[in-house]
């Protein structure tokens, strides 16, 4: 299955797939019929009638159907076997010289400015493109490392702007790392419960006061919450919330030398906030 990305541009109410060949934008004969609202086969007939005026490699190119399908999936039928004729800008203008209706005059300007010339206008100089490419890569790497949701949105917006400037698709935000999950209600309720103990002067931190750590024992907290009429369920949901906690930030689950009980106990350890 082809992984080619199909880029589409709207010209005169027609959605045209952008096709590039040998470094320049080209159109198929079917695209000419479509955008000029002519019956199918009109462009091919005009080309055949004036074939001697068209120089291959200058006005037109030929590419086999299978190669075209691989490079530009979904543009031609899977059953098509004929070589595909591609018209350069010069070839297109030569072909439509005989199209003199009002719509054709409008379409010619729109197709030249919005399609053929659009490539030149949209493509930055090589040195600038290299710089943009490096910046795009740096932004993508930064997204992989960043977990703050708001900051990730900001970086992704920058990535989108750079990608658009280069004419490249913008990777989905979720494909570049992931944000820290929002603290579930149980976590907020838990910290609120500890705040109640703080206000009552109840000691529950088993790490030394100046260690910069908050070490809590599940067994100890169960006893304290029961004594003070605080209803908190110690289950897997709360444990998972602890592991995801960023404020205060979870460090690890380990054995500590308790300053409250004067013995080694198992604790959940967080970075203590000042």
Image: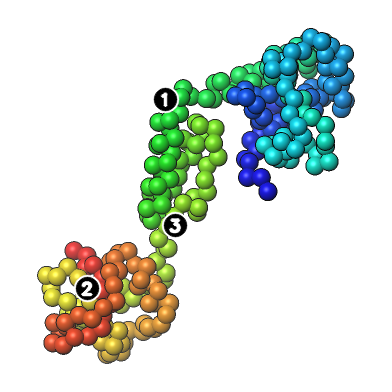
Q: Going from the N terminus, do you reach mark 2 or mark 1 first?
A: 1
Q: Nearer the viewer, mark 1 or mark 3?
A: 1
Q: Is residue 62 above or below residue 208?
A: above
Residue bearing mark 2: 214
Question: Is the Cβ of the residue at disc 2 closer than 8 Å to that at disc 1?
Answer: no
Give the SS element for disc 3.
loop
Residue 96 in the image: x percent, y percent? 78, 14
Q: Going from the N terminus, do you reach mark 2 or mark 3 first?
A: 3
Residue bearing mark 1: 127
Q: Give residue 178's mark.
A: 3
Give the SS element for disc 1.
helix
Give the SS element for disc 2.
strand
Asked whether residue 114 appears in the rendered view, the answer is: no
Name the residue rendered at 63%, 35% in the picture.
7
Query: How far is the residue under mark 2 from the one under mark 3?
Result: 27 Å
Name the residue rendered at 77%, 29% in the picture.
84
Name the residue rendered at 73%, 29% in the picture.
63
Q: Nearer the viewer, residue 259 or 221?
A: 259
Residue 263 in the image: x percent, y percent? 16, 88
Asked whether residue 26 appears in the rendered view, the answer is: yes
- Scheme of image coloration: rainbow
């Amino acid at each position: 299955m082809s992984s080619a990305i199909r880029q589409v541009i709207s010209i005169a109410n027609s959605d045209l797939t952008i096709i590039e060949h040998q470094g320049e934008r080209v159109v198929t004969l079917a695209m000419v019929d479509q955008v000029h609202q002519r019956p199918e086969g009109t462009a091919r007939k005009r080309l055949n009638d004036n074939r001697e005026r068209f120089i291959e490699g200058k006005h037109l190119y030929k590419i086999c159907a299978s190669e075209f399908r691989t490079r530009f999936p979904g543009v031609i039928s899977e059953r098509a076997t004929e070589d595909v004729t591609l018209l350069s800008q010069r070839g297109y203008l030569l072909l439509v010289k005989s199209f003199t209706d009002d719509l054709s005059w409008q379409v010619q300007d729109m197709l030249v400015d919005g399609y053929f010339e659009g490539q030149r206008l949209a493509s930055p100089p090589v040195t600038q493109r290299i710089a943009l490419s490096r910046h795009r890569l740096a932004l993508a790497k930064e997204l992989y490392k960043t977990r703050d949701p708001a900051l990730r949105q900001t970086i992704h917006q920058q990535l989108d702007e750079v990608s658009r400037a280069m004419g490249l698709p913008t990777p989905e935000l979720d494909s570049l790392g992931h944000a820290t999950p929002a603290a579930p209600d149980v976590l907020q309720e838990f910290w609120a419960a500890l705040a109640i103990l703080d206000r009552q002067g109840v000691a529950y931190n088993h790490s030394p006061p100046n260690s910069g750590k908050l070490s809590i024992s599940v067994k100890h907290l169960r006893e304290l919450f029961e004594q003070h009429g605080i209803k908190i369920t110690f289950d897997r949901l709360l444990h998972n919330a602890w592991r995801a906690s960023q404020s205060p930030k979870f460090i690890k689950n380990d054995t500590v030398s308790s300053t409250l009980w004067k013995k080694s106990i198992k604790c959940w350890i967080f970075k203590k906030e000042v």
